[in-house]
Amino acid sequence: VPPPMNPLFMVFWLYLVFLYANALERAWGSFRFTVYYLVGSLATAAVGFFPSPEPVPNAYLNASLFLAFTALFPDMELLLFFILPVKVKVLGYLTWVWLAWDFWAMGPTARLAIAAAILSYLVLLGPALRERAMLRWQVFLNRRRWKN
């Protein structure tokens, strides 16, 4: 269930979800994309079994989908307010800040929902992100070695 919002914003939000979900499915294939979303959905549903007075939001699951999109296509540009071109990686950084803020400021249910959403992100993208970090570290060491 999408978060409650103005119907006009709902159309734009659903279009963006369709845009980056479709791009991820083309990049990964149907099976891997389905596994990604299924792991996040099952983890978010599992959070719903914990007794809590607050509902479990699924906005964090869609945010993890967007973060996966930003990891694969960081240089794609979106027009903010149909005028300002903004790279997706900048919006990804802002999404990470939003998730960190909500993790710090919200209750335990939201914290578990954020952890569930990040779980699917780390399951599929963790090895690739680790490999990229190791490669950057090796480049840093090589540059330092050649500089001296």
Image: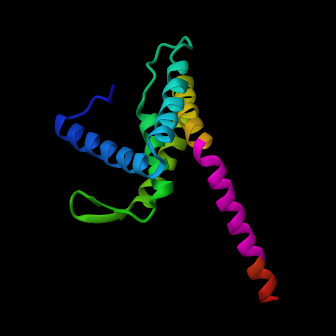
The residue sitting at 50% across, 17% down in the picture is 48
Q: Would residue 127 be counted in the magenta stretch?
A: yes
Q: Position of residue 21 (x, y in %)?
A: 38, 44
Left or right: 35 as drawn, with respect to 3:
right
Q: Position of residue 68 (x, y in %)?
A: 49, 48
**Residue sitting at 51 percent across and 48 percent down?**
96
- Whether residue 12 sits left or right of residue 38 in the image: it is left
Q: Residue at x 77, y 81 (%)?
A: 144
Residue 135, picture quadrant: bottom right
Q: Is residue 108 above or below residue 23?
A: above
Position of residue 75 measured from the top left corner of the image (x, y, whole percent): 42, 65
Counting from the top left corner in percent of width and height, residue 31 is at 48, 38
Image quadrant occupied by the C terminus? bottom right
Is residue 31 toward the left or the right of residue 81 in the image?
Answer: right
Number of numbered tags placed on the structure image? 0
Q: In this view, does 18 lie to the left or right of 106?
A: left
User: From this viewpoint, is residue 26 visible?
Assistant: yes
Tell me the quarter of the image containing the N terminus: top left
Residue farthest toward the top in the current orientation of the protein: 51
12 versus 55 height, above or below: below
The colour style of the image is rainbow
Whether residue 104 is visible to the viewer of this picture, yes or no, is no
The range drawn in magenta is 124-141
Is 123 magenta? The answer is no
**Magenta portion: prevailing SS class:** helix
